[in-house]
């Protein structure tokens, strides 16, 4: 087995760097791996009990206490019986983008705590770490050494002399932002135009240099040693650059992702690799590879905007049509389902699924509900919306309606979350969704960044007080989520690798069938504010929440969720 994996690694290194350089690169890589003692299995070891909470390390705070410690205490007391894994968004020292402009990959930001705090959290929860591998902070030691012209860092980045910028080739590069692709820096070798996909503070790394690849693989293994059970490959879409192409999803990018999978299979096969590629759905799922050789999970980026479209129109048809295509590639892959994250709701993933008019309707909805819209530049000089910046609660439910009827608003939101929990895959729940947070426009005004609207930091005492208030919206949303998660974790039908069938019963209802035989669950979700009666598939069904039994048909109230299990007479 090990010899086979080593052979796979060697073949990918040859593709990336050629036969002459491969032996030395391979030798250096194997020396890194030698200190790891992996378990024997390379199966995807997941179950329906696996649920990830997505959070910043300082999402809750208490005076005089390290935020990571506060977070640990709060989560242990609040969610340990319903959520088993925590995705701590980048907790390294950083200079911008709320953590995604990393200064030092191997340190914990002192403002959050220490590695001891991370390891303590790992005693109670599995952990997901971000490997921010496309770019590094302009304030990092690596880039500062580049500016001084010091080896080896003078070869770590992609630059051009001002007079030799390949302008026409760069016009073809697919852009995720409206910012310039190149940023000017003064270096020891004169002025240079440096590749910066995301911002002038986030400097793209040059993976055509094998030293860069080896450094990132070393950091990958460092994260494994320090408790990472899941590794999120941030912005891997843009990893490899070849002039004259769009510089996205290049064969070399997939080769690097596959090589990382090989390294983990050799050093830590139980660690799950997840690719973050906010792109159209058919491109996104290409990171499954052949089902054995690349990511075990991919972010299901089309789900958040499709759910929003579904509740905006009261018609589940588009969502049902798309969900019926969600097939896993092999027995070692599944989806990472989510509705909200630290970023906004990307609309690019549903281009080709929704029409331009339907996407425009989502843009208008976000603005009407108090959110913002972020745009990107296109190759033809136009710009188009790529992200809705808004909390998912306020996206799904009109804030004016919430003020008048919070109970109905909460039911509508929980119905949207139930759909995410029912679909094939592993759920990822953003902190602010779990606790029903609202738009934080004041924060966005303070930072000047639209994404801040969904990144509010909360005083833990205030949050605990609101959760204890039986009349509060936070309490209603959290208990609704809690009820669903308790049911889900006890039903094998919801196993991430189990089968899925989408029924067509009524446009107002999304019916998701999971499992088989005596373990079949039919999850029904009324996406409208109207009562709906639907015919049930043959058999006798029992509601997993209240034990009520049905056969023939069922009446669903507005935004009702009914998870029905097949039962004998």
Image (cartoon, rainbow, N blue to C red):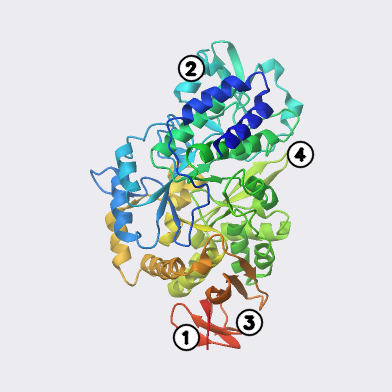
Disc 4 is placed on an element classified as loop
Relative to 61, residue 99 above or below? above
Disc 1 is placed on an element classified as loop
> Mark 2, mark 1: which one is toward the viewer?
1
Q: Where is mark 2, residue-wise?
A: 145
Q: Where is mark 3, residue-wise?
A: 537
Relative to 319, residue 505 above or below? below
Alpha carbon distance from label 3 to label 4 = 50 Å
Could you tell me residue 226's position as x and y percent? 38, 38
Which of the 4 image quadrants contains residue 7? top right
Q: Where is mark 4, residue-wise?
A: 380
Residue at far top of view? 189
Residue at image location 52% in from the left, 27% down from the top: 29
Residue at image location 63% in from the left, 36% down from the top: 238
Dot 3 or dot 2, earlier in sequence:
2
Relative to 340, residue 415 above or below? below
82 horizontally vs 317: left or right = left
Dot 3 or dot 4, earlier in sequence:
4
Crowd around label 3: few <14 · some 14–19 · many ≥20 (10 Å)? some
Q: Nearer the viewer, residue 245 or 19?
A: 19
Q: Where is mark 1, residue-wise?
A: 548
Could you tell me residue 295's position as x and y percent? 58, 45
> Mark 1, mark 4: which one is toward the viewer?
1
Dot 1 or dot 4, earlier in sequence:
4
């Amino acid at each position: 087995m090990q010899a086979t994996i080593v052979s796979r690694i060697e073949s990918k290194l040859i593709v990336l760097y050629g036969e002459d350089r491969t032996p030395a690169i391979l030798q250096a890589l194997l020396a890194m791996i030698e200190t790891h003692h992996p378990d024997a299995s390379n199966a995807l070891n997941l179950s329906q009990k696996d649920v990830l909470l997505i959070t910043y390390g300082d999402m809750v705070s208490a005076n005089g206490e390290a935020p990571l410690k506060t977070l640990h205490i709060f989560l242990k007391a609040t969610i340990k019986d319903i959520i088993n894994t925590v995705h701590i968004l980048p907790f390294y020292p950083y200079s911008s983008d709320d953590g995604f402009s990393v200064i030092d990959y191997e340190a914990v930001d002192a403002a959050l705590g220490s590695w001891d705090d991370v390891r303590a959290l790992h005693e109670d929860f599995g952990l997901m770490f971000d490997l921010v591998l496309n770019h590094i902070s302009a304030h990092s030691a690596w880039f500062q050494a580049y500016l001084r012209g010091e080896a080896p860092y003078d070869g770590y980045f992609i630059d051009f002399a001002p007079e030799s910028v390949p302008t026409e080739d760069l016009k073809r590069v697919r852009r995720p932002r409206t910012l310039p692709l190149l940023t000017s820096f003064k270096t020891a070798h004169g002025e240079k135009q440096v590749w910066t996909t995301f911002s002038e503070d986030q400097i793209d790394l040059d993976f055509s240099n094998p030293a860069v690849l080896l450094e990132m693989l070393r950091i990958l293994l460092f994260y494994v040693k320090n408790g990472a059970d899941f590794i999120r490959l941030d912005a891997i879409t843009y990893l490899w650059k070849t002039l004259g192409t769009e510089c996205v999803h290049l064969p070399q990018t997939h080769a690097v992702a596959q090589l990382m999978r090989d390294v983990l299979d050799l050093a830590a096969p139980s660690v799950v690799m997840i690719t973050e590629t906010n792109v159209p759905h058919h491109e996104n799922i290409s990171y499954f590879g052949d089902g054995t050789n690349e990511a075990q999970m991919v972010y299901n980026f089309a789900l958040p905007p499709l759910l929003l479209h579904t509740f905006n129109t009261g018609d589940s048809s588009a969502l049902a049509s798309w969900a019926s295509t969600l097939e896993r590639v092999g027995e070692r892959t599944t989806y990472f389902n989510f509705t909200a994250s630290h970023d906004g709701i990307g609309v690019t993933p549903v281009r080709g699924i929704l029409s331009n008019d339907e996407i425009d309707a989502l843009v208008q909805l976000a603005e009407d509900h108090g959110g913002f819209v972020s745009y990107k530049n296109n190759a033809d000089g136009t710009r188009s919306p790529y992200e809705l910046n808004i909390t998912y609660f306020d996206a799904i439910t009109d804030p004016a309606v919430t003020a008048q009827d919070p109970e109905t608003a909460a039911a509508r939101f929980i119905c949207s979350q139930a759909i995410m929990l029912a679909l094939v895959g592993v759920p990822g729940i953003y902190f602010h969704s779990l606790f029903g947070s609202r738009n934080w426009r004041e924060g966005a005004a303070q930072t000047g960044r639209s994404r801040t609207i969904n990144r509010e930091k909360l005083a833990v005492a205030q949050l605990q007080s609101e959760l204890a208030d039986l009349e509060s919206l936070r309490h209603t949303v959290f208990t609704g989520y809690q009820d669903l998660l308790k049911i889900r974790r006890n039903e094998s039908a919801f196993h991430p690798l189990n089968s899925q069938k989408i029924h067509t019963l009524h446009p107002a209802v999304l019916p998701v069938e999971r499992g088989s035989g005596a373990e079949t669950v039919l999850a029904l979700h009324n996406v409208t504010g109207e009562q709906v009666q639907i015919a049930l598939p043959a058999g006798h069904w029992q509601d997993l929440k209240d034990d009520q039994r049905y056969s023939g048909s069922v009446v669903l109230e507005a935004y009702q969720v009914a998870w029905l299990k097949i039962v004998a007479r």
